[in-house]
Amino acid sequence: MQRTDFFKLLDRISDGTASDEDIVRYHGYLNALQKETGAWDESRLGAKTAMEQVIFDRIAAEIHGPQLRRSFPLWKKMMVAATILMISGIGLYFYNQHLTSLSSPKTEIVNDVKPGSNQAVLTLANGKRIILNASVKGEIAEQSGISIKKTAEGQLIYTLSDAGTAANIGTAAAFNTIETPKGGQYQINLPDGTRVWLNAASSLKYPVRFDGKERKVSLQGEGYFEVAKDKLKPFKVSSGGQELEVLGTHFNINSYADEPSSKTTLLEGAVRLSPHGGQDLVLSPGQQAVLASGRMKVGMVDPEEVMAWKNGNFVFNDEGLESIMRKISRWYDVELSYQRKPSDLTFTGVVSRSKNISAVLNALDKTGKVHFKVEGKKVTVW
């Protein structure tokens, strides 16, 4: 691809007129670039600094432009630009509400901090604790006719045997708990086939077997669910002062204790929410219910933005600094210290969760509105 073709393609993606073929071609080219050792071919694409300035100007125009296409959300345009910038070596741009010029970073990185990884602790019903990131692949436990296996990709899978089903009818329910630490994430396939992805600093309590009239689990933190369909046994999630009931659907729950609200986002199917002390409501795909101070509000959101964490990205869309820093703290397992709390600052940006903490902090720093110091596992915000 030549420089002129690349810019034409970027134009179509930026203004939302790109076809499916354009998107496929764009991603194919980026994948090819990432595999090359030379990184950036200036003979074909021109100087990196010139490209970066063009992209910066285009994003600024999109943010301030009077007509944003509803079919192509702003955060997707940011992700397109950020991907190009990461390949060119810049890493990422963040933009605050004033869109100030990029400044020289003042952040001091005494030591860099690596991103989170697949880490979790499984506590069995008998109290035995298994550190999953240290466990070898294969069968790690057997409970009530159920084999618990860990895959090479770091997933936990339950396999139910017919013999175990017959032997355990009428027995009391036993519960396991899987917990991810700060700096950890994990995927688990429950005994009924439901798949759950846990974000950092989260836990899921679930029965060893779903033998009753319902399938009920408890979540703390954030989790994405793809529920196996079973019309005879509704699936219920208790979390953050509410209970959610589904028959088979995909949804995300964000219910951290240190967040001001619990957010439930539906991606597919239908769910019924029952806030404690409130009226039930049913969500449709694309809707998000926000529960705060006992009151619930429902609105439309972009599900892909909500699911960015599961797909390996941070996506911030006009998000406050303290909210961003809480996410950074959980994923990088760092302690936060504020010399001041600039609650009026908001940022828009995209960055891969696979990058070290310096990539995120330096990008925020370049706006000139906030700076950081990283020492050990402590991040000072000033």
Image (spheres, helix red, strand yellow):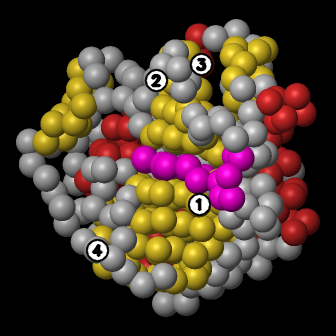
Is there a contact, CB below 8 Å, between mark 3 and mark 4? no
Around disc 3, counting alpha carbons within 10 Å, would you say few (fewer than 14), some (14 to 19), or many (20 or more)?
many
Which is closer to the viewer, label 1 or label 2? 1
Between the C-alphas of marks 1 and 4, the distance is: 20 Å
The residue where tag 1 is placed is 236
Between the C-alphas of marks 1 and 3, the distance is: 26 Å
Q: Considering only order in the chain, which callout, 2 or 3, is on the residue closer to the N terminus? A: 2
Residue at image location 48% in from the left, 57% down from the top: 238
Question: Does residue 272 lie above or below 139 as drawn?
Answer: below
Relative to the observer, which residue lies in front, 246 or 259? 246
Q: On the rendered structure, is 218 left or right of 194?
A: left
The residue where tag 2 is placed is 114
Q: Residue furthest left?
A: 339
Residue at image location 78% in from the left, 14% down from the top: 138
Is residue 141 in the magenta section? Answer: no
Which is closer to the viewer, label 1 or label 3? 1
Around disc 2, counting alpha carbons within 10 Å, would you say few (fewer than 14), some (14 to 19), or many (20 or more)?
some
The residue where tag 4 is placed is 294
The residue where tag 3 is placed is 132
- In the image, the segment drawn in magenta is 210-224
Question: Does residue 276 lie above or below 105 as drawn?
Answer: below
Between the C-alphas of marks 3 and 2, the distance is: 19 Å
Instruction: For mark 2, give the secondary structure.
Output: loop
Q: Quadrant of residue 240?
A: bottom left
Q: Residue furthest bottom?
A: 66
Q: Considering only order in the chain, which callout, 3 or 1, is on the residue closer to the N terminus? A: 3
Around disc 4, counting alpha carbons within 10 Å, would you say few (fewer than 14), some (14 to 19), or many (20 or more)?
few
